Amino acid sequence: ETVLTQSPATLSVSPGERATLSCRAGHSISTNLAWYQQKPGQAPRLLIHGASTRATGIPARFSGSGSGTEFTLTISSLQSEDIGVYYCQQYNDWPPWTFGQGTKVEIK
Amino acid sequence: EEKLVESGGGLVQPGGSLRLACRVSGFGLSSYSMSWVRQVTGKGLEWLAYISSSSATIYYADSVRGRFTISRDHAKDSLFLQMNSLRAEDTAVYHCARCQYDVDSGSYYFFDLWGQGTLVSVSS
């Protein structure tokens, strides 16, 4: 099973500032990584797949990078509507498809 | 609008059974593989089960194999999860999710559409 470790657990960022979230895989997963956003009381929403490809309708302030074992999700200018929990998910080695434990993004 | 709506959750005693349903709309269920993913309140996401578009291939997480059964009915535009021998640790919100093939990398699957989920509580 491929373990994904996200950091930090909680990220407090001022509006308009940059938010940087990390996801580390236990072994190389190429670029087979997706990022999801989950707002309170809502279903997860796909943000990024292929480590860096934005899903349809996702604002340009969200960007993903990385390959192998180290991945980053960046929100270039945090908006109030971006608060929630962000999860990474690998689809290189399956089953099982695995998720990180999540990073909670809050407004400072 | 493409949509997934789960139903069938509720309170059940340990050892009991429930059958969850996921009704799809706005797209053809027969064209997609599907999965169930659960989320313990305040915790992360756990993939549980996968079924291919034709039902020919099915996978389960170790935590539910032998107790849960995934199935689909295209005539009813629905995906199902039969849950038997339920335990307290199965208490969670259960989401259905559409599996999407990554055309750039040729890899399977990320989840491009999710339902809101249905709450299953296992308690005496």
Image (spheres, coloured by chain):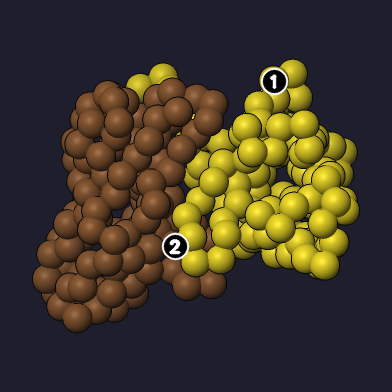
Chain colours: A brown, B yellow
Question: What residue is at 62 percent from the left and 32 percent from the top?
Answer: B62
- Label 1 sits on a secondary structure element that is loop
Q: Chain of mark 2?
A: A
Quarter occupied by the N terminus of chain A: top left
Tell me, for residue B57, which label it has, or none.
Answer: 1
Using the image, determine if residue B71 lies above or below residue A42. above
Tell me, for residue B11, which label it has, or none.
Answer: none
Is residue B3 something that shows in the picture? no
Task: Specify the quadrant of the image occupied by residue B93.
Answer: bottom right
Q: Position of residue B54 (x, y in %)?
A: 74, 23
Q: Position of residue A94 (x, y in %)?
A: 50, 25
Nearest the viewer among A3 and A71 is: A3
- Label 2 sits on a secondary structure element that is strand
| Amino acid found under the numbered disc labelled 2 | Gln
Quarter occupied by the C terminus of chain A: bottom left
Is residue B72 something that shows in the picture? yes
Q: How many residues crowd around disc 2 within 10 Å: few (fewer than 14), some, or many (20 or more)?
A: some
Q: Position of residue A104 (x, y in %)?
A: 33, 65
Q: Chain of mark 1?
A: B
Task: Specify the quadrant of the image occupied by residue A95.
Answer: top right
Residue bearing the label numbered 2: A38
Task: Specify the quadrant of the image occupied by residue B4.
Answer: bottom right
Question: What residue is at 37 percent from the left and 55 percent from the top?
Answer: A102
Both labels 2 and 1 in a single chain: no
Can you name the residue that lies furthest to the left here?
A: A17
Disc 2 to disc 1, C-alpha distance:
29 Å
Question: What residue is at 44 percent from the left and 68 percent from the top?
Answer: A39
| Amino acid found under the numbered disc labelled 1 | Thr
Nearest the viewer among B21 and A52 is: B21
